[in-house]
Image (cartoon, grey):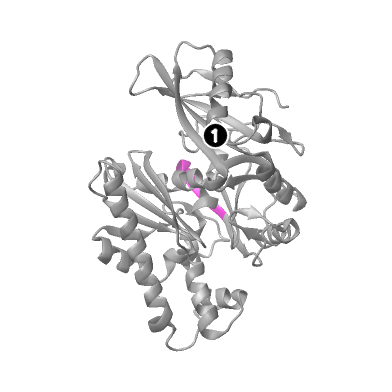
Amino acid sequence: MVSPATRHNATGRCCGSLGLLENTMGVALALELGTLLGGLFSGLSSKKNTPLVGLDISTTGIRMVELSQGSNHELRLERCVSESLPRGAMTDGNIENIEQVSEAIRRVLKKSGTKIKEVALGMPPSAVITKKINFSAALSDESLEVQVESEASQYIPFALDEVSLDFYVIGPSRGSPDDVEVMLAAARKEKIEDRVAVVQAAGLKALVMDIESYAARAAALRIVGQMRNGGKDQIVALFQIGAKITHVSILLNGETVYEREQTFGGNQLTQDIVRTYGLTFEDAEARKKNNDLPDGYEQELLNPFLESTAMEVNRAIQFFFTSTAYTRVDHIFLAGGCAAIPDLVDMVANRTKIQTEAISPFLGMQFSSQIREKQLRNDAPAYLVACGLAMRRFD
């Protein structure tokens, strides 16, 4: 067991961990909520601004981002590199072949030239259980830990000794002034251990374990803050279009007011290419990215896929309206590899009648001489999670 960590909430009050955060494979890991809750505690980093890279391990590839503090307190993008994964190395967010994934990470490190060995990782949202719970504000830190552990068993469908558990006091409960609102997060230890093992096999050390959707939100909120009036009172929809799953987050004034996942992603287009042209999945994926496909591809496959994607986005927006009291969305950001496909932004905007753009998490950053800005413009939407993870360096 690791010793209880100390964390601060928005009210300045400290709370300890439950002591259930195992020292997995020699690395103390917690399910970090700092990104979601404003970065008020730095997790497992020994001190603020510890050199750290963000490493996004997705179904289709590895993406790494390294940030530093530039002039005038602006962020500086030092490196951003990606590497594809063989099909089957990752399945639904689970690492199936540690050697293939660790080898891809080693290639990313070599390609990037980074000397940093500490990383921030993310868990897929589906692998993490999160729950907001109210507790009496009069509880001491020790009593709160006991109460959280007791309540956790009601929401976690596993034995507590099988999970890594973390919690964070958000602040006073809005509905009950005598209570505090606590965010609980839990994940299976084996899922965490797999990610720790794969980076250790590549010669790296995991310092922070975040949640991918929270890391993406942190990066997206930085961009929202550059909108008119800092994005105040603007309802922003963030669509992270993955290989198989699209994660929808609706943001308002720095908070997530709605989240949902849809079974839809870029693999649908790849599978269409495989069936139509008789290619292997790997060849179809490569030729899709390089726009190296026969005449008629756009008309027969690409345009129907883009139209289907726009319909899925519009369907998600309408579902948001019918599921909540909200009746508008002011801006849509598209993230993921598909976001950079020509014409997708226009199709979504035309279908939804909402201002739409492919998000660039590096907007407003300074760039090192190693960054190829022209290439980055096309690839940037796919680096949203990795960028959010890299920002944990500055929590």
What residue lies at 27% left-to-right and 48% top-to-bottom? 321
Query: In the image, what residue type sits under mark 1?
Result: Ala
**Quarter placement of the N terminus:** top right
Camera-nearest residue between 7 and 311? 311
* Res 44 → quadrant: top right
Q: Which residue is mark 1?
A: 185
Estimate the x, y position of residue 299 in percent, counting from the top left: 38, 83
Relative to residue 60, is residue 289 depicted above or below? below
74 is within the stretch colored magenta? yes
Residue placed most toward the observer, 70 or 124: 124
Q: Would you say residue 44 is visible in this rendering? A: no
Nearest the eye: 27 or 111: 27
What is the count of numbered marks? 1
Residue at 46 percent across and 67 percent down: it is 378
Residue 254, image quadrant = top left
Horizontal arrangement in the rendering, residue 268 relative to residue 304 (left or right): right
Query: Picture coordinates of residue 262 (x, y %)?
Result: 43, 56
Q: Is residue 202 left or right of residue 187?
A: right
Q: x%, y% of residue 68? A: 56, 46
The answer to whether one can see residue 48 in this image is yes
Residue situated furthest bottom in the rendering: 295
User: What residue do we see at 47% from left, 41% from top?
Assistant: 73
Q: Position of residue 346 (x, y in %)?
A: 31, 68
246 is within the stretch colored magenta:
no
Residue 268 in the image: above or below residue 370:
below
- Looking at the rendered structure, the secondary structure element under dot 1 is strand
Q: Is residue 229 above or below residue 343?
A: above
Q: Which residues are magenta?
A: 69-78
Q: Residues within 10 Å of mark 1 (few under 14, many from 20)?
A: many
